[in-house]
Amino acid sequence: QVQLVQSGGGLVQPGGSLSLSCAQSGAVYGLWILNWYRETPGKQREWVASITRDGDRQYADSVKGRFAISRDAKNFTLYLQMNKVQLEDTAMYFCHAQDSALIPKDYWGQGTQVTVSS
């Protein structure tokens, strides 16, 4: 089992910056990919960014060039640095992890609200 505990988030003005964290514990050595997703009322959960165990990063077009995903492998913490935020970035953000088992398991953080408003 893996536990994901998120921190960060809150209120930020358009054009500002914010950082999210996701601390992993438990069977973390089995994880192969870490993701950030976001969700707004009435919409499907949207994938934002991912980073693999090897450090390969991918971003959704909507955040490319503004957000940066990173991880501290030593301390088992995932980060999302959000820069030049826009009103459209307002959402509940979730970290996600998947292990490399034959039948992969998915793990989710509790979610953290990010509100972009002037």
Image (spheres, rainbow, N blue to C red):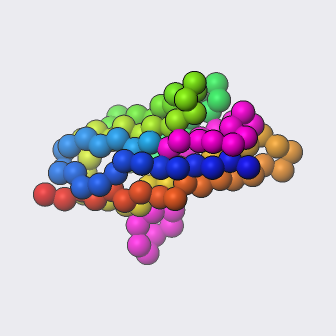
| Residue 11 vertical placement versus 66 (above, below) | below
Asked if the magenta segment contains residue 44, the reply would be yes
Is residue 104 visible from the viewing direction of this image?
yes
Q: Residue at x 41, y 72 (%)?
A: 41
Q: Residue at x 65, y 29 (%)?
A: 53
Query: Is residue 16 or residue 29 the one in the foreground?
Result: 29
Tell me the residue at 68%/38% (across/down): 28
Q: Main secondary structure of the magenta part?
A: strand
| Residue farthest along the bottom direction in this orientation | 42
Residue 63 shows in the view: no
Q: Nearer the viewer, residue 94 or 2?
A: 2
With 48 as the anchor, is 102 left or right in this view? right
**Residue 54 among those drawn in magenta:** no
The magenta segment is: 22-46
Direction from residue 2 to residue 113 in the image, left or right: left
Where is residue 102 drawn, in percent x and y?
86, 45
Numbered-mark total? 0
Quadrant of the image containing the C terminus: bottom left
Image x and y of residue 82, in percent: 33, 41
Q: Position of residue 104 (x, y in %)?
A: 78, 49
